[in-house]
Image (cartoon, helix red, strand yellow):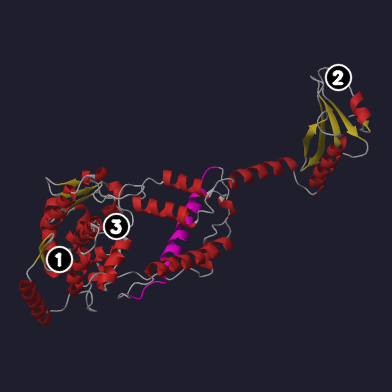
Amino acid sequence: MPKVKLTKTSIAKAVRTEGKQLLLWDTDLKGFGLLLSGKTDAKTFVVQRDIGGKTRRVTIGPANVMSLEDARKRAEQILKQFYDGIDPKQAAKAKAELSRTQGLTLRQALDSMLMTRKNLSPKTVLDYRGSVTLHLSDWADKPIATITTSMVLERHRRIQVEVAKRRAQRMKGEKPIATFAQNLPGAPTANGVMRALKAIWNHARLLPGISLGDNPVRIIGASKAWFEEKPRTDRVRFSLLPKFYKSVMELPNQIHRDYILLLLFTGLRRENGLSLRWTDVDFEERMIRLESGRTKNGAALDLPMSDFVYDLLQARKQAGNDGGWVFPANSKSGHLEEPRYALETVCAASGIHVTVHGLRRTFAAVAEESGITVLALKALINHSLGNDVTARHYVQLTPERLRKPMEIVAANMKAHIGVNAYGKSIPEDTQNKTAQRRSDAATQAPSTDASDPGSSNTDVVGN
């Protein structure tokens, strides 16, 4: 290859050979040269060296655009990479790949996961979206690869503090209510957000062409920073059901009132009740029907209506259709989305603390006391039958076979509360007689109230 001192003049005078490329190597900087095209008048600055037994040529830029001084400086940088054993082309390719993979945002990773995992329950989808949009909103449109362990630890602590502050502010000025020693305020929320982030990250690293390092959420476990979460066992004790029911009935908002009562008398999960449509309600067959994609365990639920629930839903229907929702609201979804505030009003008025899920536990406790089979109870609250092969494959509990257990549970619930039907109270003298009979029975048999240390009622429902 011919050598020449590359200058503005020599570059201008260099002439191509028709049909053949020509490389002019600079005499001052070894490996730096000028490539003349054999087909056009194009002249290009290049660098060429051997690395790993192979010759690698790197294009710097066209001579009619880049000055000789700039080209020489760039050539020196590239040659230094060669001397350091770095292949500039491979390094550039890796940098471009890193830029592409790091460009995947947290929100994009979340959308990809929700699109891929079709079996997620509506509540889980809502929790994942809420985690990102409410608690990680400032990270949502940033590359997921930029989330570090220190950021995770700091945000985990901050979420707990912020949730605790909001809860304290919301309850400010309200009279103290009976509570239970459970989790640090905000702890379940903080842990839940980080579990969601961990799942999103694990999904993102499996995407084609995506290269991510270790999941940064692992630092919480490694540093033993997860907040302790004790299983909740809250429910309304049997003896307090009349007082609780009275406070519910005094709610000024009938929609909130009926929602709480529906959960109390059916054991439905929070989201299934909130998103209940009139198309899910079969008045002719007296059934509430939920498709498999809307339940937590993925199994369709055909739940018989007790007389109490039938009357409640009839009253709601007469109040108006309101977009097809049983519990309509002026919200983005069109239905009631947050019942916690109404329930806290009831708790403050009655002095009885219970969560929305605690209503489900209350239903299960009354059901267990009613003497129905465990299998029937699991079917009513749509719990998985687990590894019980006989129950899963040989015992067929049809909706009609569940109708009698549901009525038994509803009758027992009404007796505890002191009502004959939806909106109708039992006369006070009858309530007193019922209470006396229960008191007499309690002295002759072990208590089945969850307040009794020997009771197993609160073990019936976990979620």
Residue carrying label 3: 270
Give the mark nearer the N terminus: 2 vs 1. Answer: 2
Give the mark nearer the N terminus: 1 vs 3. Answer: 3
* Crowd around label 1: few <14 · some 14–19 · many ≥20 (10 Å): many
Q: Answer whether labels 3 and 2 touch (C-beta < 8 Å).
A: no
Residue carrying label 1: 413
State the image coordinates of residue 216 (x, y, percent, origin top left): 55, 59
| Drawn side of residue 11 relative to residue 352, left or right | right
205 within the magenta span: yes
State the image coordinates of residue 440 (x, y, percent, origin top left): 8, 80
Q: Residue at x 25, y 66 (%)?
A: 361
* Crowd around label 3: few <14 · some 14–19 · many ≥20 (10 Å): some
Q: Mark 3 or mark 2, which is nearer to you?
A: 3
Callout 2: SS: loop
Residue carrying label 2: 17
Callout 3: SS: helix
Q: What distance separates the C-alpha of mark 3 from that of mark 2?
A: 80 Å
Name the quadrant of the N terminus.
top right
Q: What distance separates the C-alpha of mark 1 from that of mark 3?
A: 19 Å
Callout 1: SS: helix
* Crowd around label 2: few <14 · some 14–19 · many ≥20 (10 Å): some
Residue type at mark 3 is Arg
Residue type at mark 1 is Met
By secondary structure, the bulk of the magenta-drawn segment is best described as helix
Q: Residue at x 35, y 76 (%)?
A: 181
Q: Answer whether labels 2 and 1 touch (C-beta < 8 Å).
A: no
